Structures are given as structure tokens and as C-alpha cells.
């Protein structure tokens, strides 16, 4: 039983890395589309009055001012570190929940659930989840294939290298997760 626990932990870590790689893929697509989105006119700045700048006399900040600024800086640094540590877990759990809910939604439409055994439904649900993960990981390269990015100051080779590396990483991690779940005999319903 001890090995199944370690295998389960390893499987969840591999899945988490796959989800993070998949999120990075979609983030890369968003970065590539951002210049076109910004230049499209959707984000038009509001007209503002030009206010003349008046020079203010310089005064030395007091110790209290410095302490307040230092305190706010420390709070923001600590908050940033906390958020950076929590972000992978949040991404993983949210993506896992989305895959499981999507699979539960799709399964009754694809399979006759009344005439299928529970064991067979679990196997089919596991396959559906794997297919959904692969679709989420392979869709960004497909989107980039049919897009052109004239506003992006990057060479197409750089765009493709980053996309294919992250995509291969996500697909590889999802495949490895599925393989490890099979090797360790873990119920795929418990896999993230």
C-alpha cells in the first residue's frame, strides 16, 4: 500500500506539470494575439484634459514616511511570493475540475449510460479525460498554425520553438500520467 501512495503522489505531480505546461501554452497564444488586440481599437484610451505640471518644492521624507513605504513594500513582496507559490496548485485543481466536469457532461451524450456497466463507464470516462487533456494541449499549436502575427516582433522560428516545446511537454506529461496510472493501478477517477 505504501507504493501506491508514492505512485499516486508521483502521478498527481506529473499531471500538475502537464496542466501548468498547458496553461503556459494558452498564455503564449494570448501573448501572441495581444498586439493585434491592442491595435484593433477595442482598448481606446479615454480623452483626458492636459493638466500643466506644477513644480513642487522638495522635502526630505520623514522616518514615518519611510517606514510606511517599507511596510507596504514588504507586504506586497510577501503577497507576491505567496501568490507565486499558490498559483500552480490553483491552476492544477481548476484545470482538473474542468476536465472532470467536461468528461461527466460529455459521457452521457456519447455513451449509452443505462446499458453500460459502471466499470466500463469508468474506463470510458478515463479515456475521455485523456482525450480532453490532449485536445487542450494540442489546440494552441493548431491555432498558431492558422494565424499570422505581423505585429509580433519575433521570428516565426522562435514562436514555433516555444510553442512546440511547451506543447510537447504538456502532451508528454499527460501521456506519462496516464501510463503511470496504468502501471500503479490507480483508479483514473482519482487522477487529476
Image: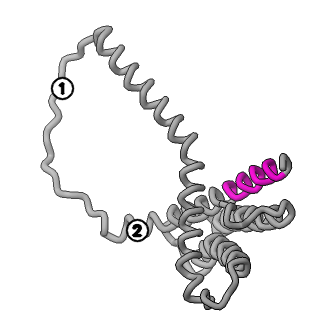
Quadrant of the image occupied by residue 174: bottom right
- Determine the residue positioned at 64% across, 60% down: 19
163 w.r.t. 56: above or below: below
Which residue, given by chain and number where applicable, does mark 2 sit on? 37
The magenta-colored residue range is: 4-17
131 w.r.t. 185: above or below: below
Left or right: 38 as drawn, with respect to 132: left
Give the mark count.
Answer: 2
**58 within the magenta span:** no
Residue 187 appears in view = yes
Quadrant of the image occupied by residue 163: bottom right
**8 within the magenta span:** yes
In this figure, which colouring scheme has been used for the structure?
Answer: one colour
Which residue, given by chain and number where applicable, does mark 1 sit on? 55
- Which secondary structure dominates the residues rendered in magenta? helix
| Separation of residues labelled 2 and 1 (CA atoms) | 38 Å
Mark 2 nearby-residue class (10 Å; few <14, some 14–19, many ≥20): some
**Residue 169 locus on image (x, y percent):** 73, 62
**Residue 101 locus on image (x, y percent):** 54, 70
* Tag 2 near tag 1, CB within 8 Å: no
- Determine the residue positioned at 55% across, 63% down: 97
Amino acid at each position: 500500500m505504501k507504493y501506491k501512495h508514492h505512485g499516486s503522489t508521483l502521478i498527481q505531480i506529473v499531471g500538475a506539470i502537464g496542466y501548468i505546461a498547458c496553461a503556459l501554452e494558452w498564455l503564449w497564444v494570448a501573448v501572441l494575439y495581444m498586439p493585434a488586440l491592442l491595435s484593433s481599437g477595442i482598448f481606446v484610451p479615454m480623452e483626458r484634459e492636459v493638466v500643466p505640471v506644477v513644480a513642487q518644492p522638495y522635502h526630505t521624507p520623514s522616518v514615518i514616511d519611510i517606514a510606511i513605504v517599507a511596510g507596504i513594500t514588504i507586504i506586497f513582496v510577501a503577497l507576491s511570493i505567496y501568490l507565486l507559490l499558490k498559483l500552480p496548485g490553483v491552476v492544477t485543481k481548476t484545470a482538473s475540475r474542468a476536465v472532470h466536469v467536461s468528461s461527466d457532461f460529455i459521457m452521457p451524450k456519447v455513451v449509452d449510460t443505462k446499458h453500460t456497466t459502471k466499470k466500463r463507464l469508468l474506463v470510458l470516462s478515463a479515456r475521455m479525460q485523456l482525450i480532453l487533456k490532449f485536445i487542450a494541449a494540442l489546440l494552441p499549436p493548431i491555432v498558431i498554425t492558422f494565424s499570422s502575427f505581423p505585429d509580433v516582433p519575433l521570428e516565426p522560428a522562435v514562436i514555433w520553438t516555444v510553442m512546440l516545446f511547451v506543447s510537447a511537454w504538456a502532451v508528454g506529461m499527460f501521456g506519462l500520467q496516464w501510463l503511470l496510472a496504468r502501471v500503479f493501478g490507480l483508479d483514473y477517477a482519482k487522477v487529476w
